[in-house]
Image: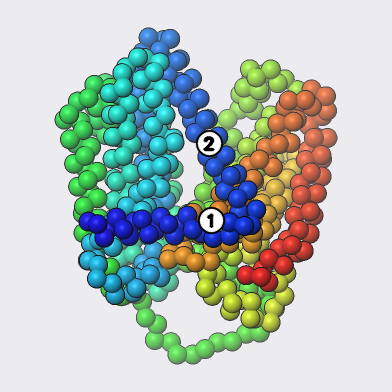
Amino acid sequence: MRKTWRLVYNYLLTFIGSFISKRRNARFAVGVLFVLGIGALMVFLFTNTAIATTVKFAQLGVPELAMYSNSFMAILIILFLTVMRSALPAKTTDEQLLLSLPIKKTQIILAKSLFNYLFDFLSLLGILFPSYIVYAVINRAGIALVFRGLLITALLPLFSNALATLIAMLFQKIATSFRNFSLVQTFLILLLIGGYVLASYALNDYLVSNTDLNAVLNRFKPMKWIMTFVLNGTLLSLLWIALISIGTYVISISLRVTVFGKEVKSYRSKKNDLNFNAKAPLWSLYQKEIKYYFSVPIYVINTIFGAIMYVGLAIVLLFIKQQTIIDIMSSMNIGASGAELAFILAAGCIIITTVCTTSSAISLEGKHLWILKAHPVKVRDVFLSKILVNMTLTTIPILLVAPVLGIKYGLANIWMFVLIPFLASLVIAILGLYFNLLFPKLEWESEMQPVKQGLSVMVSLFFGFAFVILPFVLYFAFLVNRINYLWFALMLLGYFAVWVAGSYFLLLKNGKTQFERL
């Protein structure tokens, strides 16, 4: 077991070292502080939400409903973590090295799994665990409830990691029977994402429409086990949670050990002909990038959620009456004509800017970056090819959604539903690439590390949210009753256009220099 913990410790040091290896460079320190600050902000927001929910139910005389809400959130988080972890890579770059060491396969797999578990546990520690502390303090439930909540927070990531591993291995088994192994695996994971979205919606709809708490808990046993153990310390509930979490975790580790180090058998083509067509450098680079994007499942599922949610937003808005949105705005003392369109634009821009493939595009080149740099192509074409992949993913849903919103909210407003989200996504595509040049992560053992754990990814995500939300906050705070929504849309268009021009200039000037130094 000591070797296992030593490997975990080594993985942790490697992860931390990727941030402090350039400790003399101020931008890395600023980037880390920025991410830590955003993390603290997210914990603060979730804690405030827990406080508001717990106080509300306590005033209504049903404090246990707050724990019911927490249990529901725990189930959704676990399902989400399962989906995000299900893109398990078939092989890692350190596989042969580890197999050559005097370490058992079980210890290697366990170390890798525990390292991933650590990230999921820390996520739940910031998102779910504060709700248990808040409940204990407000309802004076005692410190024992907090410790029971901590135990649940520690057990749940075991189940999500195990289930994700089992799903990934099943998908790999199915995909290897087809010619385009990676594309089929990506398609299966996209189906899983769609299933998660539908399941979340169906579960939420069922819970909202059913007022009988006992009937709901009896139907959804995992939620009942979490709630009864945290509230009452029911040992039978803990036994079920531990048995399922630890049991599935042990099974997943055992299965991974059996396939670790073995060649992944896949479809073999018997075609020997080589077809060659002369193409423009930019088009060739774009084709390479888009093919690579869809061949890496973790890359896809980490970046395509926003595009799916954007289409989902349009579907929801299609069935919601415009007057309903106006009434919601009026309840917030916002009664200006057209303010609901600004609200829709804000939601759409925030969602579509979460699609950012460029924030890890340079890092994913890894040790093969020198090959790209050795090609007789312009740096500008390299940058544009990566930006075009991002814009392909965002432009399609934007063009699909704009006519739908135009029919519902006026055909004369279609231009704003096209141009404003398009420019917002273009800005984040350019800045994502620039941030990746500033904070590259070229040494990794699987694509999961640069895609999910890269500093540039986190900085791009939160910076994108900040620069998008700023003009809308200013509008609703100071300008909503002073200027027409059309004037605001034009101002917004200019705001994003300036960001596009400035960020593109920065990319071609400073970004090019950073690229040549890599």
Q: Which residue is mark 1?
A: 19
Locate residue 92: give its quadrant: bottom left
How far apart are the two marked residues, 2 and 1, measured between alpha carbons? 19 Å
- Do callouts 2 and 1 mark residues in contact (Cβ within 8 Å)? no
Residue at 65% in and 53% down: 26
Residue 15 appears at what percent x and percent y?
46, 57
Question: Is label 1 in a helix, a strand or a loop?
Answer: helix
Residue at 27% in and 23% down: 144
Let me know if residue 58 appears in the view. yes
- The answer to which of 242 and 367 lies nearer the viewer is 367
**Between disc 2 and disc 1, whose residue precedes?**
1
In the figure, 19 relative to 404: above or below?
A: below
Q: Which residue is mark 2?
A: 40
Here the colouring is rainbow
Residue at 65% in and 19% down: 332
Q: Amino acid at mark 1?
A: Phe
